[in-house]
Image (cartoon, rainbow, N blue to C red):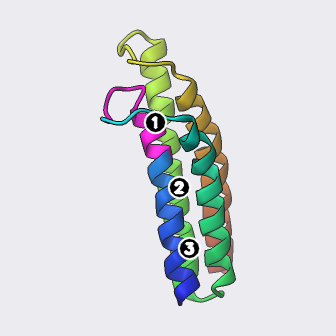
Amino acid sequence: MVLMVFGALVMALGVFCGAVLALAPLGLAPATADMALWALFPLLSITGFVLLAMAGRSGQVRNFTFAAGCVLLALALAAVAGIVLSAMGLFTPVASTAPLWYVLAVAGLLGIAATAAGHSVQQR
């Protein structure tokens, strides 16, 4: 139970880092996207996922894995929306869109893996 709670909190911190990375270039976050966030986003997200996986194979863990994957995919969708709006000239970012591309790649890959893992285990 302790690993599950700790893993969930670590994963939430990782997703928060990714959200700040995605929102800062859009001017929607009061914080700046420091280089530490670039490293902490995937590191904390993956560590939290591994801790949750080590907690066991209960239905609660599977459901959280699936939900976390959906949150990561939503984060990737927000990043790609910012990129598209910027490319169309409908929105002018306050900083480089490089963090958006990074969040799109990392959150997209992790989100696909997490939802696939949570969904495939639920199917059995």
Tell which circle, 2 or 1, labels the residue nearer the N-terminal end: 2
Instruction: Indicate the amino acid at tag 2.
Output: Gly
Relative to 49, say whether 13 is above or below.
above
The mark nearer the N terminus, 3 or 2, is 3
Where is residue 19 shown, x and y percent of the image?
44, 44
Q: CA distance from mark 3 to mark 2?
A: 10 Å
In the rendered view, would you say 43 is above or below 61? above
User: Could you say where residue 76 lies in the image, as x and y percent from the top left?
Assistant: 53, 42
Residue carrying label 1: 22
| Front in this rendered view, residue 90 or 102 | 102
Q: Left or right of 2: which side holds 50?
A: right
Asked whether disc 3 touches disc 1, contact meaning CB atoms under 8 Å apart, the reply is no
Local packing at callout 2 (Cα closer than 10 Å; few below 14, some 14-19, many 20+) is: many
Which residue is under mark 3? 7
The image shows residue 105 at horizontal and vertical percentages of 64, 38
Q: Is residue 2 magenta?
A: no
Q: Residue at x 57, y 35 (%)?
A: 35
Q: Residue at x 59, y 67 (%)?
A: 48
Q: What kind of residue is marked 3?
A: Gly
Residue on which the image places disc 2: 14
Boundaries of the magenta span: 18-29
Q: Residue at x 45, y 30 (%)?
A: 81
